[in-house]
Image (cartoon, grey):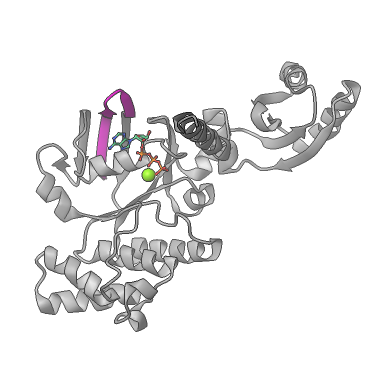
Amino acid sequence: MCIISIKNLTKQFDNLVAVDHISFKVKKGEIFGLLGPNGAGKTTTVNMLCTLLTPTSGYAKVDEHDVYKNKVEIRKSIGLVFQEPALDSYLTARENLEFHAMIYGMEKKERNKRIDEMLNLVELKDKADELIGNFSGGMKRRLEIARGLIHKPKILFLDEPTLGLDVQTRRHIWGYINKLNKKEKITIILTTHYLEEADRLCDRIAIIDHGRIIVTDSPHKLKEKLGGDIISLKINNNFSRFANELGRLKWIREVKASKGNMNLFLTVKEGNRAIPKIVYLAQKLKIKINEIDLHKPSLEDVFVHFTGSSIRERENNGKLKLENLRKKMVPAK
Ligand SMILES: Nc1ncnc2c1ncn2[C@@H]1O[C@H](COP(=O)(O)OP(=O)(O)OP(=O)(O)O)[C@@H](O)[C@H]1O
Ligand SMILES: [Mg+2]
């Protein structure tokens, strides 16, 4: 059964189409991920589903309610953890949760019980009466997740739940997310640009890029779609020529070239047999290989396959563009 259903959902800001005719369905009880680089349109999508933004066009139902007409009903059904931290540093952990519970009109007895349950779930019970200002980034994130759950929503939206946290804390948070998905039987929609996060946590993923959904499936099936082993190569010279020569070989199923960082990604049936042939060809063409790696397809390879470049490269390009823009905006002395 689908708890979220969207079709051709679109959001335009002036001349920019931030979300461009996207369609997907989320099943009840699923952890569904929107995976994409900075500026892909993830937050905009979440904000439309949470009724914080009105779509420009398209159809979206959340827990059977229409995002245009039934905003109040949707807000009762969902919990939301924003990408930007949104806790009050001058309140204690318990006070932050209490304030949220009061907004939802929960009675004192029910409120206290639920706050204790949620603090237990994210293992912050012993910090309940400490000021948020003294909390670490990971503790704050856990408390925000607890807050999003106070009013027992059916669906929890987590916008970049582990952004900026160290790897160990990130793994801890994945543990809590999994626990509450199983224990509270809650549907979770999360956005991320961390490939490992999408891979480890999500039952299904939609890859979103430039406001469009490129592909939707389970991490396992997405990797299977690539159909073979991946050889990645870092080349020192004659990049285009080598890419063309490899592209002509029938036993190589696919060649993806990422010229910016001189990387080639090859999909082959039997990687261990292919490597000597590739090295031989490189020697013949006087091409220097700096690095070579053979692995089973990862979500990173899936991203490259469907979008033509790696998620990191995409984000760095974005940063470069932004830096150039800023440089242009500095007034001449
Ligand atoms: N209120 C707004 N007005 C104008 N443009 C906006 C607005 N909100 C978002 N955008 C633009 O829409 C695009 C998508 O932004 P969005 O925040 O949805 O991306 P994102 O995938 O969440 O990125 P990130 O990973 O950086 O959080 C970006 O180009 C952004 O600059
Ligand atoms: Mg975002």
Q: Main secondary structure of the magenta part?
A: strand
Vertical comparison of 270 with 92: above or below: above
In front of the other: 300 or 330 = 330
Inspect this view and state whether residue 268 appears: no
Query: Eyeballing the image, is 88 above or below 113?
Result: above
Residue 43 image offset from top left, x and y in percent: 33, 43
Q: What stretch is highlighted in magenta?
A: 1-19
Q: Is residue 152 above or below residue 134?
A: above
The residue nearer to you, when weighing 235 against 283, is 235
Q: Position of residue 199 (x, y in %)?
A: 51, 49
Displayed-image quarter of ligand 2: top left
Looking at the picture, does residue 226 appear above or below residue 110? Answer: above
Left or right: residue 292 compared with residue 50: right
**Residue nearer the viewer, 276 or 111:** 111
Residue 204 visible from this viewpoint: yes
Coordinates of residue 158 in the picture (x, y in percent):
34, 53
Q: Does the magenta stretch include residue 4?
A: yes
Look at 43% across and 50% down and name the residue there: 202
Query: Quadrant of residue 140 in the image?
Result: bottom left
- Residue 35, image x, y percentages: 44, 42
Residue shown at the point (79%, 30%) measured from the top left = 236
Residue at 76%, 19% (x, y): give it: 249
Instruction: Report the side of 80 relative to 280 (left or right).
Output: left
Name the quarter where the N terminus is drawn.
top left
Figure label count: 0
Q: Which residue is located at x 18 percent, y 36 percent? A: 54
